[in-house]
Image (spheres, coloured by chain):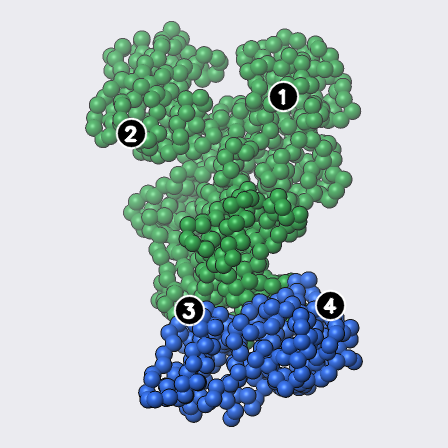
Chain colours: A green, B blue
Amino acid sequence: MASVTFSGNRARAGLDVIIPWVEYYNTNSTWATTKTWKWAKLSHAMPTTGFISGQVLNWGTISRALSDAVGEHEASRFSWTIFDVDGDVQNQYGQDYGYFINRLAKIQLTTYDEAVLGVNTPLVALRGVVRDLDTSQPLQVTFHAEDYLSMELGMEGLDEYIPKRVISSTTGFTAFPDNFKGFPVPIIYGDMTGTSIGAVPGMYAGTAAFDSNYHVIILAGHACKSVDKVYIGEEDQTPAIGTDVLIPGGLNWPHANKYVDINGNRYTVVYVLGTKAANILNGAVMLTANVKGIETSDGTALPPGGNLADGNGTLLTNIYDQFLHFLVNFFFGNYQTGGWASNPELWSDSTSRINVASFATAKTATNNRIGGGYVGAGAFGLQGDRPSRAQALARWAVSADCRYGFNIDGQFMVAVDDNTTPTDRYTQELDIIKDSFKVTFQASETRNVVPYLHTPDFPGLKWLGYKQVVHQASVTAYDTIRQADPFQFWFIRSATIAENIAKTILWRLKQFPREVTFETGLHGLSTELGEMIYVDHAFGPYPNGYSSRKIWVNRVELDLNRFVVRITGLDWDDYDDTFSHTTEDYYAGQTIGVGSTTGAVAQSGGNTIITTITNTVTTVAPTMRVYLGGSRSEAVTTAVGGWEFLPEYVDVILDSSKCPSTFVVNIHCKTSSAGCTVTPRVVTLQADGVTIDTVVGTGVAKNNTSWTGSGHWQAITCTPQVGVHAYRIQLQASVANTDVFAAGAMLEW
Amino acid sequence: MANIVYGHTTENYAATYAAAVKTGSADANYPVANLADFNPVKPHKLSASGNGAWEWNLGSAKSVGFFAIINHNLLAGQTITIKSHTATVADWFTTGTTVATRTIPALYGDGHTQNVWLDTSAGTARQYWGMTINGSGDSSPISLGEVWLASTKRQFPININWGVQFTFQHDIIEHKTDYGVSLIYDYGATRRLMQASMETTDAGWTQYEAWWRDARGRATPVIVVPDPDLSDVWMARFTSNDLVSKYTFLNDHEVTVALEELSLGVAVRG
C-alpha cells in the first residue's frame, strides 16, 4: 500500500479529519517484547492498529534540513510532551532508563477516512531516536528525538573516526613494529594513480607468513581491484615484480586470492624482499603503489547477495556509488572481512535507514552536468589520516557536490540541485498562508571567487590540484573580491571534474543567495528535501514578483499543533554551463592535513588567514593543524645573519578556555644553494591585537637544498603568552650567506 | 418533555461488575474492560463481525435503572436488547427475560451515531443481566465506547426550565491565504454543552446537590438523559467546579444546571 497523501484541494474543501500520532518503541528488562507507546493529542481507536492515547500536550517542531555547503550535518529533530497521567512512563523510566534512550520513535499521520478504510498506510512524518527525556514538570514527560546520524555522531568514543578499523591486534602478523600499532587500516576507492610515484603509501607490517624473507606492506583493509604499480622511493618496481616485489595476482603471488585474511581481517598487501623492506621500515624510503580500490561483483554500490569482495569484480568509479558503499560498509557498518553488505541497516520497524534511490537520482543529476558523471577516487587511512566521522561525511559531500540529510521516512538521503522541472507548485492564492512568505537576502554569503583543492597527494602530504574559479562579472558588480574558503575535493582526482564542481558552487554563490520561506498546509509534506518547487508570489523580489520561480528546498518543518508545513529553500536559477568565469591557480604547494582529526584547516597564500580554533587542545596528538608559508620563495634583502620575515602569517584565535600551554610549529625550509644555512624561528607579532614582536621559538640551522629527503622538517616548541588567546604568528628566517630561502610551517595543537 | 433522567457516578454497576463477552470475542487491542473505564473514546471491540452479547453478574439479584451505550458503531435498524436472568447464560439471544429493546436511529451527518439509553427500571431484580446486539456494526466488528448500568433511574421532582440552551462544538484548524482561500483540517470531534436553570423545591435542591457531590463536581463523569422522550444520552461533566444555587424563597431554589459532554473523538468506525 502507498502512504497517505494530503492534497491542497481536500484541505481547501475541508474534507480531511487529520489524525497525527507518535509511536515510540522500547524494551526493558521486564517487557518480553518490544513495547509500543502510541500518543496523540486526541485519543483515537484505530481500526486495525490499536488505540492511540490522547496524552500529548504539545508537539515540538518536526524539523528536517540538508547539510550545509561544506558538508556539515544539520540534525533532524522532533519532540513532544505528554501528560503522564498514570505515571506509567516516569515509573518505567526510573527503573529502566537505559531502555528509553536511543529507541525508535516515529511521527505518523493519516486521515479518518484512510484510518477507517485502510486503503493507504499512514504517512511517516519522521523517524528518529529518542535522545533525552525531560521529566522536570510534574506528570509531564518531554521526549527529544533526532536522526540516527546525530545520535551516532554524538556518541563519543564509539568508532568516532574513519577508518574505524585500526591495527588493534598484531595476532597473525610476524614482527609487526610496535610504532605502527593503532594505525588506521586504509579504505581505497577508485583509481588511485600517482604521477612520479604511487598514490597510495604503504604501511610496513612485519615479515610474511609464507616466507620470512619477504616483508608485508599493507595497502588497504579490503580486497582491491588491482595493484598496478609499486614504487620504492622514486624507483619503479615493475622489473622486480615476481622477485623482489610480489603484488596481488601478479607473478609468483603466493595466495589463491588477491587478498589476505589475517586474524579475521581482510587486507590488500604487497610483499617486499630483503633490504628494500628494511629501508621502508627505517623510514629511509617510502613504498607507494598505484591502486584500483573497492570493487563489487556487479559494479553497483549494493550488489545483491553473493558478492565476494575478492578483487575480481568491477571497480566502483562513480562517486555516488562509492559514497553509498562507504556509508553501508564503513560508516554505519564496520567491514572486517567477507563479502560486502547487500543492504543498508534497517530501522527496528524494518525500514531501510538509507534512501538508496536518492543516490541514483544524484548520480543522474551529476551525469547531466558532465559526461561520465563525477568519477571519484580517494582514500581514508593513508599516512595515518583518520578524520572524524563528521569530517569523513563532509569530504564525501563536498567532493560529490551534494547535500545530505534525512527524508520524511527518517532515511539518510543525498540531494543535488539540477535543472529538473518541478512537480510541486505553491501559489500565493491557493497554498501559501497569509503573512508567512518572506525572502531573505544573504548578502554576506556572496562569493565570486571559489578556490578549490583536489587530488590529495598522500605520500607528499600536499594537494596536487589548486585552482580557483572567478566570476568577474560579480567581482565588478560588487566592486570587491569575495573569496570563499577553499573547497577540498578529497575524492576528486580529475581537474575537469573538480572545475565542474567548483564552478557549480560559484554559480550558487556569485549573486547573493536568497532564502525563501513560507508556510502551507499539510500538502507541503509531499515536498521532499532537495526537491525543486515552483513558487508564485507577488512579493517575490522581482518586478512582477515570483512567477514559476524555482526554489531548491533545504528545510522542511512540520508543526502538528497548527497542521502547518514550513518550507525553506534557495531561490535558484537554472544552471547554465556556459556562464562566464575564469579559472586560475589558487596557490602552490598546499600541504594537506593528514592525521588531523578535528577542525583541520589547510590554508595559506595571503596575509589574511584567519582560523578559529575551538576544538579541545590536547598534547597527546595534534588535533588541529594550520599551514602557512607553503613553498613560497623569498629573497633575503637584509644583511646576512639578520632575521627576515616571510610574508605569510596566520591569525589564530583560540578559545580562551582551551588555550594550549604550548604549540608546535613544524618548520620546513631550504636554501637555493649548497653551503648556505637557514635558521627558522617563530615570532608572535601580535597578541590580543597588541604588537609584541616576541620570539616564541627558534629552530636549528639547516642547509637543505631540497624539499625531499629526511630531516628537512624540524619541530619548534613554542610557548605562547599566558592568558592570551589571539595571536598573529609569522615565520622569520636567517641565512648564513646571501641566498634565497623558502620555508613553510605547520602549526599543531 | 419528561423530566431529565440522570444517574450517580458511584451507582454505575458496570464499573463494579465486569462484563463478560458471551457471543463473539474481544479484540486484544480493545478489551471488554474498556466498556467501563469512563473513557468513551477508548472503546471495546469484538474481534470479528457478527452478533454480540455481554453479561453482567451483579453478585445478587439487583434492579437496574437504565442502560446507556455511549459512542458506538452500530447502524440504523440494529437492535439492542436488555435481558435479565437468574443464572448465567450461554446464549442471551435465546435465553433470559427481555426487559428493554432499542432500535438504533440514523447516523448523524458527521458520522457519529446517536448514543442510546434503555429504561430498565420496571424490570425485576435479577443477578444476571445481558445485552445483545444483532448484526455487525458498520459491517465491522461491534465497537462500544462505554456501557453504563445505572442502578437507579433518577429524576428531579421539577424539570429544568424552558429555555435550556444547547451548544454544539466542532473544532477545526483553519488557515487563510492572502486571497482568503481557506485550508481547513478537521479534528472530527463534536461536543455538546447544555446550559439550563432549574427552579426547584427543597427536595429537588437536595437531590441536585447529592448528584453534584457524588460526581465530586467536575472531577468524574455523570450520565444524563436531557430529554427522556428521545433515545439520546450524554456522558458528561459539570461545566463548572462551582455549584451555584439561589435560595429565592421558602422551598424555592434556582439552580444552574450546566453540563458538557465528554469528547467522543472521531466517530468509531471500522
For the residues labelled 3 and 4, the Cα–Cα distance comes to 49 Å
For the residues labelled 4 and 1, the Cα–Cα distance comes to 61 Å
Which dot, 3 or 1, sits closer to the camera?
1
Q: Amino acid at mark 4?
A: Ser
Residue A725: image tag = 2
Q: Are the residues under badges 4 and 1 in a single subunit?
A: no
Residue at image location 40% in from the left, 16% down from the top: A715
Residue at the top extreme of this rendering? A675
Q: Is residue A550 left or right of residue A477?
A: right
**Residue A591 appears in view:** yes
Residue at image location 49% in from the left, 56% down from the top: A84
Write down the residue under mark 1.
Answer: A169
Tell me if mark 3 has few (under 14), some (14-19) or many (20+) residues whose alpha carbon lies within 10 angstroms of its own. Answer: many
- x%, y% of residue A700? 36, 10
- x%, y% of residue A406? 54, 50
Residue at image location 44% in from the left, 85% down from the top: B204
Label 1 vs 2, first from the N-terminus: 1
For the residues labelled 1 and 2, the Cα–Cα distance comes to 41 Å
Which dot, 4 or 1, sits closer to the camera?
4
Tell me if mark 4 has few (under 14), some (14-19) or many (20+) residues whose alpha carbon lies within 10 angstroms of its own. Answer: some
**For residue A541, what is the image quadrant?**
bottom left
Quadrant showing the N terminus of chain A = bottom right
Between A107 and A695, the one lying in front of the other is: A107
Task: Give the secondary structure at mark 2.
Answer: loop
Task: Give the secondary structure at mark 4.
Answer: loop
Q: Amino acid at mark 2?
A: His
Write down the residue under mark 3.
Answer: A433
- x%, y% of residue A126? 54, 55
